[in-house]
Amino acid sequence: MRNVFLFFKKYSVFIFFLLMQGVSLYMLITYNQFHHTLFTMFSSEVSGNINFKVNRIESYFSLAKENEALRIQNAKLLSQEKSSIFSLDKSSSINADSGTTDSRAAQSQFEYMPAKIISNSVYLQQNYLMLYRGSEQGVLPNMAVVGTNGIIGTVINTSKNMSIVMSLLHRQSKLIAVLKKGSGLGEISWDGKNPAFLVLTKIPKTVVVKQGDTVITTPYSDRFPPSLPIGTVYEIGQDQEANTYILKVKTATDFFSIQHAYVVKNLLQNEMDELKSKTIKE
Amino acid sequence: MNLIVKNTLRFFFILFIQVFILNKIPPLHQFVVPYFYFIFILWLPFKTQRWVILLLGFLLGFTVDMFYKTPGLHAAASVLIAYLRPFVINLLLPKEATEWGNEEPNRVSMGSLPFTTYVILLTILHNLYLIFLEWMQFGSFFYFLGKLIATSLVSLLLILISELLVNRRKKGR
């Protein structure tokens, strides 16, 4: 027995070291599989508050750019306002249009909730954003996050007042995307090299692609509203092994200076999930 | 200044630089990521107890992790160098660690050559382990090697700059 105590006394520091390594590696490994560890719950509230304070100062640096983007969006929205649409006497065509759809059955599918971005990184291999809006304000994991110019990422975890978003600039981020012209289905991901460019793969070579073509979200996604811009084709490369392209895509969102985002809630999500699980059961 | 107060202030100051300044600087390349925070462990006084160094290393790494949202990654790396630090010092210096006062490892107390070796060795070990853990999740061997070299060079440069900027010659009481 004495030897056991002596052993522990002699190697106490080493055992302590192994314990700390164990804790660290455990956190590292489990975090990648499940995003619901204690870590984010507790850390996002703490670091979120500090980030929020620093961000208040930081936001001054990109005010001009951000204002410009908001102004453009305002202009766009104002031009859609009823009062700014000058309708000539073309009522017949409008009638024909509304005649085919039953206005009572129309239902809006996506709800946009504004949120302020309080922390953002682009230079790491796994980049996350933090939003100042959490579960108490209606944000849930797996909701889409969209900026004024294009999509940003997906919510992976929420706490009371903050939520963490996996940015498009994340090595494990994968989304289905289509080309606006030509429509081939592809997969958008990030190669970790330049935060201004994404990679679009799995577009078959039968589709004609030109530089400058727009890449948008699919109508098949249950998270992202259809045809939101993701980026534009910048460089066209060929995959030698498969019969597909490797396209370098310039991001529509300027990840360096984003400050405002919209969390998108799919109002039909529950119904979709229900139907899916029902189908799987049967 | 009291040793504990001094090191606490240093802890937060170094953390602030790492998280809010170095984390926001645009890098030249994907390989170049400035890691600098572990200089706190390098600068701890000689006679600090080994388990205290370990605990501080864990705290430091964990706090950096909170801001980088990589739980465990930086904590694992800084615990490793916190554990190896006393061995490296014993290897380079003839005296026992207990014989030292409140002095910190620096050019004067250790001598230029041993101190440089000490810094380079621990920097490379820290980055090696950190990037190795990252490499396990994704990336190729080329990514691992390139990032190790580039990151270590940047770390060493940052440590050199802070050595020149901060005067640590005065003996702590």
Image: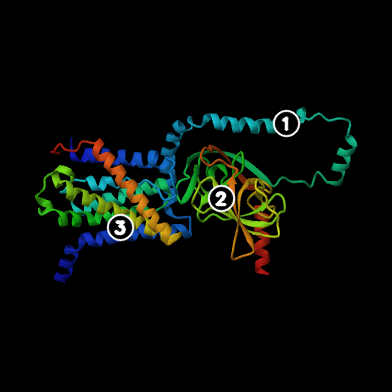
Q: What is the CA distance from the residue labelled 3 to the residue labelled 2?
A: 37 Å
**Looking at the image, which is closer to me, A113 or B47?**
B47
Q: Chain of mark 1?
A: A
Q: What is the CA distance from the residue labelled 1 to the residue labelled 2?
A: 32 Å
Q: What is the CA distance from the residue labelled 1 to the residue labelled 3?
A: 59 Å
- Which of the numbered marks, if any, corresponds to residue A20? 3
SS class, disc 2 = strand
Badge 3 crowding class, 10 Å Cα cut-off, few under 14, some 14 to 19, many 20 or more, is many
Quadrant of the image occupied by residue A90: top right
Badge 1 crowding class, 10 Å Cα cut-off, few under 14, some 14 to 19, many 20 or more, is few
Expressed as whole percent of the image width and height from the top left, the position of residue A86 reads 81, 28
* Residue type at tag 2: Leu
According to the image, label 2 marks what residue?
A198
The reply to whether residue A18 is visible in this rendering is yes
Q: Is residue A81 left or right of residue A147?
A: right
The reply to whether residue B72 is visible in this rendering is no
* Residue type at tag 3: Met
Q: Quadrant of the N terminus of chain A?
A: bottom left
Expressed as whole percent of the image width and height from the top left, the position of residue B2 reads 18, 37
Counting residues from the N terminus, which is met first, the one under dot 1 or under dot 3? 3
Of discs 3 and 2, which sits in the foreground? 2
According to the image, label 1 marks what residue?
A79
SS class, disc 3 = helix
How are the colours assigned in the image? rainbow
